């Protein structure tokens, strides 16, 4: 039987994830006013920065250390060519800086978006 302790221990998981979100929040705030190296992904409106990649790495590493059996779909990983498939397995879906265009132009309307799915349903 598969152990979905992340869903069963929802409060513990939420606390764990929030700890790393606070760290990532500081990374984004620090980078917000700095010059950014910006790369194009699929179009001029589809951008990625070093901060996007750093935040995704922090979140993926943290969750993977706690839940190594879970799967991940990260926006920047997918954009870099990583092949993923949404299955019934526990899966974290991450957009490290939702609103990268705003971030690049220093408009303060950005978020770190994380969803968790089991059986292809957001929990």
Image (spheres, grey):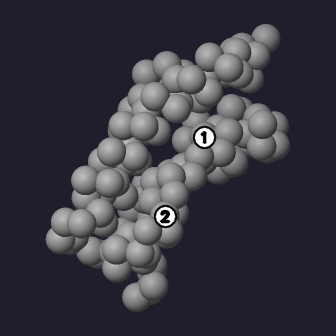
Specify few, some or many for label 1: CA neighbours under 10 Å numbering under 14, 14-19, or 20 or more.
many
Q: State whether residue 49 is above or below residue 6.
A: below
The C terminus lies in which quarter of the figure?
Answer: top right
* Chain-order first, disc 1 or disc 2: 1
Residue at screen point 18% across, 71% down: 35
Residue found at the very far bottom of the displayed protein: 44
Residue at screen point 61% across, 22% down: 13
Q: Position of residue 8 (x, y in %)?
A: 76, 16
Specify few, some or many for label 2: CA neighbours under 10 Å numbering under 14, 14-19, or 20 or more.
some
- Taking the image as drawn, is residue 72 in sight? yes
What is the spatial separation of the Cα atoms under label 1 and label 2, in whole angstroms?
19 Å
Residue at screen point 41% across, 75% down: 107
Q: Which residue is mark 1?
A: 92
Q: Is residue 14 left or right of residue 10?
A: left
Q: Which residue is mark 2?
A: 110
Q: How many marks?
A: 2
Q: State whether residue 68 is above or below residue 89.
A: above
Q: Position of residue 61 (x, y in %)?
A: 39, 32
Of badges 1 and 2, the one in the foreground is: 2
- Give the structural element (helix, strand or loop) at label 2: loop
The N terminus lies in which quarter of the figure?
Answer: top right
Q: State whether residue 28 is above or below residue 18.
A: below
Circle on res. 79: none
Residue found at the very far left of the displayed protein: 35
In which quarter of the view is residue 90 placed?
A: top right
Q: Is residue 31 left or right of residue 84?
A: left
């Amino acid at each position: 039987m598969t152990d979905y302790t992340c869903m069963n221990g929802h409060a513990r998981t939420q606390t764990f994830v929030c700890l790393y979100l606070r760290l990532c929040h500081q990374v984004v705030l620090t980078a917000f006013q700095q010059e950014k190296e910006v790369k194009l992904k699929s179009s001029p409106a589809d951008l990625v920065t070093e901060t996007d990649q750093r935040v995704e790495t922090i979140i993926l590493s943290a969750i993977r250390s706690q839940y190594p059996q879970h799967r991940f779909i990260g926006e920047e990983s997918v954009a870099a060519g990583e092949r993923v498939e949404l299955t019934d397995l526990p899966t974290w879906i991450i957009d490290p800086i939702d609103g990268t265009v705003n971030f690049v132009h220093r408009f303060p309307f950005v978020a770190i978006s994380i969803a968790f799915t089991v059986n292809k349903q957001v929990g």
